[in-house]
Amino acid sequence: MRDHFQGPQGHEGPQSSDRDEGAPAVWTGRATNRVQWLMAGVGAACLALGIDLAVDSAWTAGLAPLVMAVVGCVAAGLLMLYGTIAFVHVAVRVDKDTLEVRCGHIGVPRTRIPLAQVVGADFDPQVTPCQWGGWGYRWRPEKGTAVIVRRGEGIVLRLWDGRTLTVTVDDAEAAVRVIRDRLRLLGGRPASA
């Protein structure tokens, strides 16, 4: 998906560096991983198995093993469903003051970072789930925080407190350009190292 710029009334249009209205454009982008729908299917199957065991079971080994099997299947199914559906896609929005990252269909987890806290933005052409320990919302002490929904290009934000945030998003180069422009407008500080 390509980047989209929205004008002050919410109409999409080309970015203008010298807007007369005083309201800068909004950049939006997304990334999607359709493979995670397969994992959601596996989670739904686990959930269905747990419900089937609870409703129609001829379990002869006793009540405790049946309860453990039902609870285990239902818990695994719910965790897999939420974990995959929440990270099937990510949406990134950059306006004049903030960068917002929303995950999944309901937008949770959501991260809002004021651009005043951003020191720089870099383009990473190859972000992989292996670098971060898998898909989803990740944290590694030596690397920072990441929202990884697929392998490929991403944005790396460097924050004033030394932390970093990496987000996989389509057309990340355009997002980095927009963020760097916003940082220049916020105070003339350097936008990249």
Image (cartoon, rainbow, N blue to C red):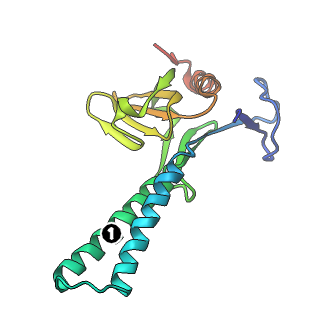
**Residue 68 in picture, x, y percent from top left:** 22, 75
- Nearer to us in this view, 13 or 40: 40
Question: Which residue is located at x 41 percent, y 70 percent?
Answer: 47
**Residue 111 in picture, x, y percent from top left:** 47, 46
- The reply to whether residue 122 is in sight is no
**Residue 99 in picture, x, y percent from top left:** 55, 39
Amino acid type, label 1: Cys
Identify the residue position indicated by label 1 in the image. 73
What count of labels does the image hold?
1
Dot 1: few (<14), some (14–19), or many (≥20) neighbours within 10 Å? many
**Residue 130 in picture, x, y percent from top left:** 37, 31
Question: Which residue is located at x 64 percent, y 28 percent?
Answer: 171
The answer to whether 40 appears left or right of 70 in the picture is right
The answer to whether 150 appears left or right of 51 in the picture is right
SS for dot 1: helix
Up the image or down, 116 lies above or below 91; here it is above
The answer to whether 95 appears left or right of 149 in the picture is right
Up the image or down, 130 lies above or below 49; here it is above
**Occupied quadrant, residue 16:** top right
Question: Which residue is located at x 50 percent, y 32 percent?
Answer: 151
